[in-house]
Amino acid sequence: MDGINELYLKLTQRLMFNIHEIDDDYDVFVAFETMNNRGKKLTNLELLKNRLIYLTTLYADDKFDKMDKDNLRKQINDTWKEVYYQLGRNEKTPLSDDEFLRAHWIAYFAYSRRKGDDYIHFLLNKFSVKNIFEKKTVVVSGEFPAVVGDSEYDPDVDIEDEPGEADTVEVSKLEPSEILNYVYSLKDMVKYWYDTFFPMQSDNLTDDEKVWVDRLNRIGIGHFRPLIMTVIGRRDLSPEKRIELFTAVERFIFICFRLGYFNATFRSSEYYRAARSIYLKEMDIDDLINDINDTTEANIEYALPNFITKIEKHFDNKGGFYYWNSIKYFLYEYEYQLAKKNNLDKVSWEMFTKTEKDKVSIEHILPQTPSKYYWRNQFRQFSSEEIDFLSGALGNLLPLSQSINSALQNDSFEDKKTSKNGGRRGYQNGSHSEIEVAQEIDWTAGNIYKRSKKLLEFMENRWKFSFTSQQMDKLIYVTWVNDGRAIPASLPEEKEKPAESSKKEKQVTKPVGDLGELQLQFWANFVDYCKADGRDNDIALRKPLAQNWYDVPVNGADYHLSYTVTRSKYLTLLIYAYTKNAFERLESKKSEIEEIFGDKLDWYSSREGSEAKRIIYKREADVFNPSKQEEYFSWMVDKCDELSNALVQVGEMDEEPVEKEKFSKLKQYLEECGKTELTLSFADIECIIGCTLCKSAYNYSAYWAPSPTHTMPNTILAAGYKVASVDLIGKSLMLQRQ
């Protein structure tokens, strides 16, 4: 009864009405399209629907009568009903209106890549009043088939071929049939768009197709989604042919993006155009498959060195393969292969990727900090640095079927293998990979070496490429375990130290002092690190202060980037959006930003009522431990670059100028050089620019790869050259004129 009374009160006393009196000469449909009192901006999908319905009223009755107009409006309404149903079909993960409209525009119209929202401008210009009232002349003579007479054709008789005057008619530049065809296409394609996100719920895919589309979602489908939508929509193609295309796309993504770290837009224009060609049946599917495979093959020689450089950098930062952003996908594929081979159930991807506080789903078999006697004795012949490398080796990482408390990672190998009440689920009862590892009696450096090699050989076979023996050794990284070194006598057994005791011992390594002093020293060291790395013009612009944050400005934006540290164990990189509108705009591009960045961000940690919003990415860190700070600084710079790159790609941050003043002399030198190929030592470049190159230039090939945050290679490109090869040993570059 209380509910009815409350409803009655609202209906009779709390409703507010705005009355708008519209003059006779003003079109009510225009008023409806532009007027909005919901306190919320019309979405592009709503705006387009209103526009199309309005346009149906403008055609002359003698060309398009009332019944036709009513029918067209009904088709528009039915289409939007279907679109909203499909986009909201999964209540937990509703799909973006804008992403679907843009994907359909890519497949239906000619793609351009001027800016992220050019599709809606195109659609509103295409479906406009101007295009209805603007006429075009259409020739209608010859529209009917010629009548074939009974008389035979005589080649010797000249036939006068002088046509009469052609019949023409004036028609609208935008015919009703164009609106109807577009609406039909939207209605048809939206279900295939849904299938690209949720293949396991699809009625349009075979079981094998579902597996492959699901795989594409796991690896990060990226700019291929419109193409996959159109291929699924081509019901004339066989499931086998579609799977052949899915396989080629997945291999392309793994090699070019997950190994090669190519720019996220690599070949996007070509495959957006291919989506339209496949939709219109202007391209043969086999030609497209061959093109994707050929592109992948041609880029393997560039992707593998990039991968090795990245992994070596991860080892430098004490993370090894654990820091590789595709480690979960790779280990899951190995797990899938074991399951398929043994005809057993697969591990759930959701369980595999679920993140819980203080829990891990990928375990270091040899712990990162092996404090227990078993591990210290088992690896006693190796230095602490070598143990760090062994811990981060590919063969030491294991996907768990059930996440465990991080504290259990230090258990001995025997304890890890067997299940315990109230503890972990043992390897013997775990994932197929766990069961495979559980066959070992002990876990040694030799086991890590062999399993690393086995997993890399699986990578070669699964994605059909080959490492050279030198590349294989670089990725195994711990080849020195076979150096034949003497193994010292076993360590004397001792009682395990209580956790509290070891915790106190760890804290001794931290500097002692006031929190403000620690923060000031941390930021001062970070700024010095950035300046030494050549980042004094962007990240290192700010003066370090005794506070828990350090801001990185973004020119002309309504947000900035920032780092934060506290006494706790987290180091954070965040986007600080100044207004709710700025946050909502970024949020609308959430999936694209995260896909390019390569990891999930925390979007909803800000207080509900706050105007400014934070978008967070963080890691655990012993923040004020001096011995760890260089590792943290490298992570901070890398993640800032990766996040900046994602923001550039979605149109939320301007790319750096093609050159900065300090590199202008190099550009001038190359433009005046005239050679088609030349080799420059790093010392030569330093002489030309008049300053020292940063440490990254000497240590990482990736520094010389063009990207929005790498000014030096962008300058080389602007001068008409490309970096053909980098010799970090000889400290030189080979450049080729483009």
Image: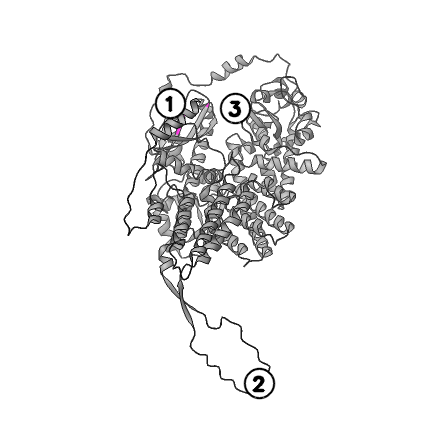
> Residue drawn at (58%, 85%), measured in percent from left and top?
154
Residue type of the residue flagged with mark 1: Gln
Q: Which badge, 1 or 3, comes first in the chain's sequence?
A: 3
Instruction: Tell me the SS state at disc 1.
Output: helix
Q: Earlier in the sequence, mark 2 or mark 3?
A: 2
Residue tagged 3: 357
Q: Are marks 1 and 2 in contact (CB under 8 Å)?
A: no
Q: CA distance from mark 1 to mark 2?
A: 98 Å
Mark 2 to mark 3 CA distance (whole Å): 89 Å
Residue at 46%, 32% (x, y): give it: 601
| Magenta highlight on residue 326 | no
Q: Position of residue 132 (x, y in %)?
A: 38, 58
The N terminus - image quarter: top left
Q: How far across and down, in percent of the image, does residue 542 sit? A: 33, 32
Q: Residues within 10 Å of mark 1 (few under 14, many from 20)?
A: many
Left or right: 596 in relation to 212: left
Q: Judge from the rendering whether residue 365 lies leftward or rightward of residue 194; answer left or right.
A: right
Q: Are marks 2 and 3 in contact (CB under 8 Å)?
A: no
Q: Residue at x 64, y 49 (%)?
A: 239
**Which residue sits furthest bottom?**
156
Residue 572 in sight here: yes
Q: Quadrant of residue 638?
A: top left
Check disc 1 and report the residue beneath it.
519
Position in image of residue 359 (x %, y %) = 55, 24
Residue behind mark 2: 155
- Residue 156: % across, % down: 56, 87
> Label 2's element?
loop
Q: Secondary structure at mark 3?
A: loop
